[in-house]
Amino acid sequence: MSEQRKGTRTGARRCALQALYQWQLTGQPLEAIERQFVQDRLADGARLDYFSQLLHGVVEHLDAIDAALTEFSDRPVDQIDPIERAILRLAAYELLYRWEVPYRAVLNEAINLAKVFGATHKSYKYVNGVLDRLAHKVRAREIQAAR
């Protein structure tokens, strides 16, 4: 198995979340942050190819992601706590652009990230609420088929 395919998508999401958070707060070039994470986090069990796809995908589609989140959030995206914002952006990217990932997996992973990294003990509830409404809009057929 190649270095790119080792590790898990869960590990990739965790690293992508931390990298996005760093990018949001510092404005450092994405490539520099990615390089740092690849060098420093190789042992974290992250699938590096997926980490890179997530990181670049969120930034590439940021305007569309933020527009989608704004529709279901109670405040502008830039006013959401930075860690919840990064979690929401990451999961919204997967809901909108990674159709091979089941919506339930996206929501579960985002909720778990919010439970671990969230700014408050209730962060996961907010993340779940926003993403559940987004999923019902963009993954309606998948949700209907799952019932």
Image (cartoon, helix red, strand yellow):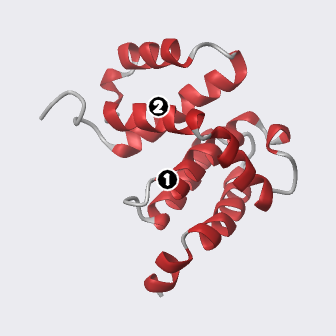
Number of the front mark, 1 or 2: 1
Quarter the N terminus occupies: top left
Q: Position of residue 85 (x, y in %)?
A: 71, 41
Residue 20 picture quarter = top right
Q: Position of residue 19 (x, y in %)?
A: 54, 26
Secondary structure category for the residue under label 1: helix
Query: Residue 131, which numbered label?
Result: none
- Residue 65 in the image: above or below residue 18: below
Q: Is residue 97 left or right of residue 6?
A: right
Name the kind of residue labelled 1 in the image: Tyr
Does residue 24 appear left or right of residue 116 in this picture?
A: right
Q: Which residue, given by chain and number where applicable, does mark 2 sit on? A: 15
Residue 116 visible in the snapshot: yes
Of 132 and 113, which appears nearest the observer? 132
Residue designated by label 1? 97
**Visible residue check, residue 45:** no
Point out residue 86 in the picture as x, y percentages from the top left corner: 64, 38
Q: Residue 98 sits in which quadrant?
A: bottom left
Q: What whole-number distance in Å separates the C-alpha atoms at marks 1 and 2?
A: 19 Å
Nearer to us in this view, 25 or 100? 100
Callout 2 secondary element: helix
Q: How many marks?
A: 2
Lower sequence index among marks 1 and 2: 2
Q: Compared to 128, does 60 lie above or below? A: above
Crowdedness near tag 2: few (<14), some (14–19) or many (≥20) residues, C-alpha within 10 Å:
many
Q: Residue at x 55, y 56 (%)?
A: 96
Q: Is residue 16 above or below residue 92?
A: above
Residue at the left extreme of this rendering = 1
Badge 2 amino acid: Cys
Q: What residue is at 82 percent from the left and 37 percent from the top?
A: 78
Quadrant of residue 135 in the image?
bottom right
Q: Residue at x 31, y 24 (%)?
A: 43
